[in-house]
Amino acid sequence: MIKICMTLLAITLTVGSSFAETWKEDLEKGAATTEQNHLNVPFAKPTNWKTPYTTPGNWPVFENRGPIDRSPPDKSSKVLVMGTGDPTPNPFRHGPAMAVIVNGHPYFVDCGEGWWRALAHSVLAQSAIDLASVFALPNLKYMFLTHLHEDHTVGLPSFISNPYKFGAGGDKKVFGPTGVDKMIMHINAAWSLDRHEMAQGSIVRSPDGSTAVGIPVWPGTATDGRKIFEDDNVYVEAFPTKHGFLEHTYAYRFTTKPDGRVFAFGGDGTYSEGLSAAAKSADILFVEGITRKNVKFATWGGDTEEEKVRVIGAYHMFPERLKKVYDESGVKSIVLVHVQNYNNPENFDRLGVLNEMIDEGIENILLAQDGDLY
Ligand SMILES: [Zn+2]
Ligand SMILES: [Zn+2]
């Protein structure tokens, strides 16, 4: 009976002109609760939830909304969040991946696991702008890496090679910390057999656009940042950040030329002066966050809570530290991505880390889902 009603409701909604509106309302409702799973994925409750695979943050029952358009309608420059995942293998979140979109051109920030599929997911699930046109193969040109950890770079072979399989490459440039040149050189070399087969084999492609160039951004530590890229659409600056024991990691600050929106991307890391400078009076800071309250449930970082706070704290952003960035920078809003939300299954709250940040006194803060537009 319920099923029949649902079918009738679906038909009514599809026929009615307000379908899109109702759908959006449903998604927003989903964002406010932890009761429903919008994906309708079957779920077998694991007996051992203390593994990277089974940690409650990965459970489909806690993935209860799809992409939302949260961008101001009167601004043409947008940020698409394609991947909000972290190294935990959450099957419902792609690895770190974002794109600043200006005048129909994408500028990508970080290239995590499943990057190429993340594009398709956003194209199919986010209808506020024509993403299939934005991601036209020759447009896939510019990548900005905040740091060279595996979870932010493992999608690079896809970024370089996948578009080529469909007939186009583009003159790809990958900006990142010192070492990015070597990383790209090695990726080019590692997939040379595939490339040569396509260029010389039955498909016969031009080898143009089948490789990329890695461009190290300035290896300095001065916190006032430096311009690293400019074209007709964007002005990009890099600022040094602090993330574990990596010597060079960066936050990027994009100023969009048509409408002057300012987006900062923190990448991974704890508090740093450079991050506050990158986010100075920006419209949005896209940044990671981790629970302090429930860090004892983290699937890595040691055996005791004390050890986890010390080890994880050297790498990641506890709420009190993000509050410091918020206060110092005067940033207008924060969007959380790459969130480490640990807890036991009984007390798991999808919005747990977000609420810790709000309790710390951060206003205007949102939690992103793959496919959201800002
Ligand atoms: Zn990292
Ligand atoms: Zn990371």
Image (cartoon, rainbow, N blue to C red):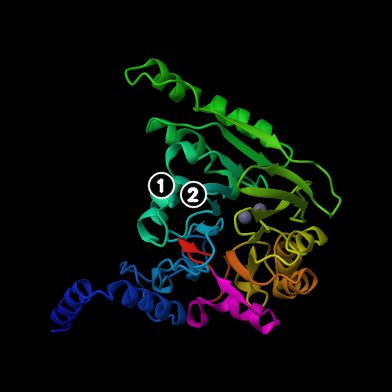
Q: Is residue 239 visible?
A: yes
Given contact means CB atoms under 8 Å apart, are the residues at marks 2 and 1 in contact? yes
Which quadrant of the figure contains the N terminus? bottom left
Q: Position of residue 298 (x, y in %)?
A: 61, 68
Quick check: is 366 in the magenta stretch? yes
Q: Residue at x 37, y 79 (%)?
A: 25
Relative to 15, say whether 188 is above or below: above
Quadrant of res 47? bottom left
Quadrant of res 167? top left
User: Which label was assigned to residue 187?
Assistant: none
User: Which label was assigned to residue 133?
Assistant: 1
Quick check: is 320 in the magenta stretch? no
Q: Residue at x 47, y 36 (%)?
A: 138
Relative to 85, say whether 115 is above or below: above
Q: How many marks?
A: 2
Q: Residue at x 66, y 40 (%)?
A: 175
* Residue position marked by numbered label 2 in the rendering: 104
Q: Earlier in the sequence, mark 2 or mark 1?
A: 2
Q: Position of residue 246 (x, y in %)?
A: 75, 48
| 256 on left or right of 350 | right
Q: Secondary structure at mark 2?
A: loop
What is the magenta range? 344-367
Q: Position of residue 187 (x, y in %)?
A: 57, 31
